[in-house]
Image (tube, helix red, strand yellow):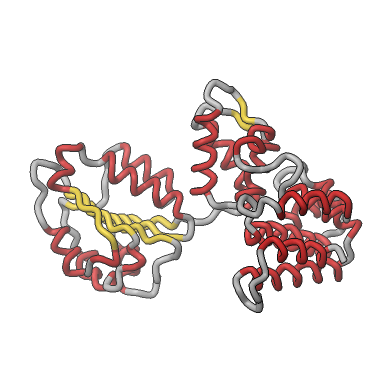
Amino acid sequence: MDYKNIVLQLEKKEFKNIYFLHGEEEYFIDLLVRYFENKVLNNSEKAFNQIITYGKDLNASQLTDYCIQLPMMAPYRMIIVKEAQSMRSLPDMDSYINNPAPQTILVFAHKHKKMDGRTNFAKNMKRSMQSVIFESKRLKENAVPSWVVKYMAEKDLKIDLDAAQLVAEYMGNDLSRISNEMGKLAIQLAGKAEVKKQDIEDNIGISKDYNVFELQKALGKKSRGQIAKIIQYMAANMRTNPIQMIIGLLYSYYSKLFVAKSSSNGTDASLMKALNLNNSYFLNEYKSALRNYSLQEIKNAIHTLKYYDLKSKGVGNKNMSDRDMFAEMIYKLIN
């Protein structure tokens, strides 16, 4: 069942006995868990009938005991198991899944990975008419700008596509982080009707002229003078420009160049497909870079970034500072 259908059922008070929320994207899991925590039982009912526990702290026998108890002055007992992926005896809940207590709503929040579909527990969950399984999947990067637009619309704010694209480029597809930052931005911009690119640059720690995107653009143009100015500023502000974030974003950039260089026929349509772009805002920037780099140079850049990724994590690094490592890495990218 998808997220929207689960929410619709919950709003209608159409509850199942077991909900298994799993997958790599924690954002939707957290939203559903908050709904169960706050909207199924009222405050007086929660005192005796709502239990929130953690997978590492209980076993199947304890959890079953919680579930089979009768509610007190409430229609349901609500049992929420957070970090269910840490519950070693989870497969032992198999017998309960086959015969759940009708007065209990049991919610598993199994984050960061999918459940093991090979177990009898998973197979019985799928067969049960009283169970709901929800897999929370990561959004593809090219879907993030549209998601940002919808998210801000829910807060009665418009955001232009350039600004939404900048958010996606800066934060990737981490919806929890994006929603946190955009939620704070909505508060800061109270009274405004629309979020512009300038608002993102001013409020989410992106220097207008000296950020990783301007660095990316300068590297694409092989503009040594501009690169020197940017790395001087960024190297002096490594706290707001952590090297692993820089490496990750540049690795994504050069990887896209590699795919486009090796698979595109050169037309705008094929380039957008190869680059996984859903609008043409950054297309000219990529086209410029593709003219300036050979396929071998792109391969060398990817190899360099892999090397410094390991070095930034301590592999072969003899006390080299992030600042020096960053400067050395950029030098090798352009030489």
Q: Residue at x 28, y 58 (%)?
A: 81
At 17% from the left edge and 46% from the top edge, which residue is drawn? 76
Residue 216 seen in this snapshot: yes
Label count reads: 0
Q: Residue placed farthest to the top in the image?
A: 191
Q: Which residue lies furthest to the bottom in this view?
A: 316
Residue 2 locus on image (x, y percent): 43, 50
Front-most of 295 and 131? 295
Q: In this view, does 192 lie to the left or right of 218?
A: left
Q: Relative to the observer, which residue lies in front, 303 or 229?
A: 229
- From the top left corner, tell me how far across and down residue 36 is, in percent: 29, 45
At x 54%, y 45%, the residue is: 178
Give residue 290's quadrant in the image.
Answer: bottom right
Which quarter of the picture shows residue 45?
A: top left
**Residue 157 lies in what quarter of the image?**
top right
Q: Position of residue 84 (x, y in %)?
A: 33, 63
Quadrant the C terminus occupies: bottom right
Q: In this view, does 289 lie above or below 332?
A: above
Say which residue appears at 80% left-offset and 70% top-offset.
299
Residue 129 in sight here:
no
Left or right: 79 with respect to 7?
left
Residue 174 at what x, y percent from top left?
A: 54, 52
Q: In this view, does 264 lie to the left or right of 79?
A: right
Viewer-closest of 126 and 285 = 285
